[in-house]
Amino acid sequence: EHTSIARSQLTERHLTPHPLHLHRTHLTNSCIFCERTSKNFIVEKGLRQELENDFFLNMAIQHKQRILCSCIFATALFNTLQYANAFQSSPLIVTTTPSSNKLHQPSSSSSRLHLGDFFNFGGDNKDKQKTSNTPPKEAENEPPQTAATTDGAYDADDPVEKIFSFFFGEREAEPMGMKRMTKDQFPERYPATKTEWADPISSDDTEMASIRPLLKNTNLEERALKLAYDANKDGWNPASFHNKVDKKGPSIVVLKTADGLVCGGYNPKGWVSYGEARGSIAAFLFVLNGPYVKGGAPGCKLQKVGGPGLAQMDMPETGPQFSPDGLVIPLSKSSPKIARSKLGSYYERFEDGGNSLFGKSGSAKLVQFKVYQGVYEEGEFVPFTDAEPFALY
């Protein structure tokens, strides 16, 4: 009635209704807004009332939009739960048992699915055991542990896993015959470990053996190393540095300061001198001695933070840059042996809040600068030897 009255009145007065306002009126089914000679009018129940203040009109529109969005979300969620409960007896539907949080086939005594079931992290299991009249399933009836549930990346109690399992079934170990990616196969898709250490290999010399433990869960963990660049022999300048290390894969930088501190960083993507930022969540900085190396550990590692981006700034006119400020060795003509470090933005700080690899000072003078890289057989694939136009890892 409101719509027809409004349309007739608008036609009589030769007014042109605003399309956006008519659309809102159709959704709310209560009134029609129109514009005429830069004034706003509202037609409701056959009466026209001029609104002198546009602020109240905008507030009313926003309020109705919020209510409409809330109703749409609530309706969709209610329909989803109703659909789930309607087909609760289907063998394709899975729920969780209070005792083990494992996915299982539902029985006739299974409880109905509610919103809270998707967000149950196991905290109320004890209360459910006290109030439930249905005894829990025996251990032998539970599905056996497979690679799908033991690869370290699957948690049956996760709300997202519950939703996907409900609609698409239990997670398969090898979907369509394809093996899943695991941390062992692709270690550098994860942040650097700080609690595990690699074992030395037979080809390591004394200095290689000191940095080998840091390479746990990297592409160089079990690969023989070689000294690719030594600034004291090859020159303290960017050209010499890039000539020795470019397009040769992952690398580890080892520095020694005038104060005796041994530190550096691991670059999983290497250098190619294309003037690009090369990202990797597996990059890290480290110190091998000093007050931060405790408990007999071979060193102290600082992980990449804020995602993988800007882990390494690959600039042909400078030396290595671990992020714009984490660890920078410019190799400038005026002071080629000066290095800078500022932690917190791209690499984590020390546990006591220290924000520089060099202690209280943000810079240090170097007496040694070396780069180690992996040894590859002739014809063997060397990773990360070209540009990364779409670096997604």
Image: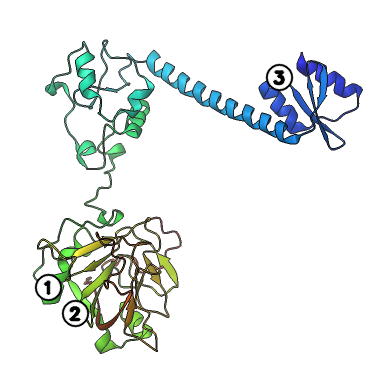
Disc 1 target residue: 204
Secondary structure, mark 3, is loop
- Checking the image for residue 30, the label placed there is 3
Q: Is residue 379 above or below residue 112?
A: below
Which element carries disc 1, helix, strand or loop?
loop
Residue 12 is situated, as x and y percent measured from the top left of the image, at: 91, 22
Disc 2 marks which residue? 260
Tell me which label, 3 or 2, sits earlier in the chain: 3
Identify residue type, mark 2: Gly
Q: Which mark is residue 256?
A: none
The quadrant in which residue 256 appears is: bottom left
Q: Nearer the viewer, mark 3 or mark 2?
A: 2
Q: What residue is at 33 percent from the left and 74 percent from the top? A: 362
Q: Position of residue 170 (x, y in %)?
A: 29, 29
**Residue 388 placement: quadrant:** bottom left
Query: Which of pointers 1 and 2 lies earlier in the amino acid sequence?
Result: 1
Residue found at x 42% / y 75%: 315
Residue 144 appears left or right of 5: left
Q: Residue type at mark 3: give it.
A: Ser
